[in-house]
Image (tube, rainbow, N blue to C red):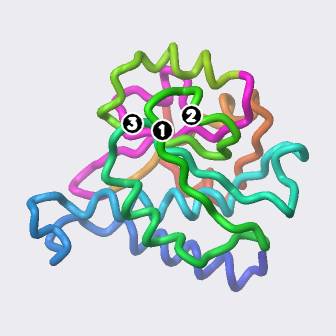
Amino acid sequence: MSFKAIKFVLLGWLLLVLPIGGSSRAADGELPEYEVKAKFLYDFAKFVEWPAENSRADTPIVIGILGRSPIGSELGRIIRDKTINGRRLVIKIGTSIGDMDQCHIVFIGRGQEKPLAEIFKELKHGHALTVGDVKDFTKAGGMINFIIEDRKVWFEINDATARKAGLTISSKLLNLAKKIN
């Protein structure tokens, strides 16, 4: 990715952390929070390197949504007709960890009933980037967690967990993340 393209993406991220709410798309009372999170998910895929066996140019990048979450429909709208490094993007929605097989990114939302430790144990053998919007997600073993502060969507990254799974997160993305304790 060229410096100009990276600069454009980083500028876009700065705009994403603007306050949520107030959108005409929020007519049903739902904040456009999941639109912002879906845009981040798409951008995360640009700044993560997977092991060679998960990075073949002829395979799509699969983003899994575990459980029920409004992020799936938003993400579908955002990734339509887009590619990353020539690879198309696909969404896979499932209700069990087994459904998340072959996913490059797995989003675990607040509505997930299974304990996080159990989910991470089952995902351990894969190389999926785990992203959530659950309290203490990164402390429990998740890699990226969305947080809301002052009505803005931010994210925190547990890079050590990502590296253990064989993933490399770009320093550009790491620099944008909130620091975890």
Q: Which SS does the magenta portion mostly show?
A: loop
Residue at which label 3 appears: 67
**Residue 40: % across, % down:** 49, 60
User: Between residues 131 and 1, which one lies in front from this camera angle?
Assistant: 131
Is residue 165 depicted above or below 129 in this figure? Answer: above
Q: Amino acid at mark 1?
A: Gly
**Residue 121: % across, % down:** 61, 16
Foreground: disc 2 or disc 3:
2
Answer yes or no: do the residues labelled 2 and 1 have beta carbons within 8 Å? yes
Q: Give the quarter of the figure containing the N terminus.
A: bottom right
Residue at which label 1 appears: 94
- The residue at the point 46 percent across, 65 percent down is 76
**How far apart are the two marked residues, 2 and 1, measured between alpha carbons?**
5 Å
User: Between residues 145 and 177, which one lies in front from this camera angle?
Assistant: 145
* Mark number, residue 99: 2
Question: Which secondary structure, mark 2?
Answer: helix
- What is the magenta range? 125-152
**How far apart are the two marked residues, 1 and 3, measured between alpha carbons?**
6 Å
- The residue at the point 68 percent across, 59 percent down is 47
Sequence-earlier tag: 2 or 3: 3
Question: Which secondary structure, mark 3?
Answer: loop
Residue 172 lies left or right of residue 111; in this view the side is right
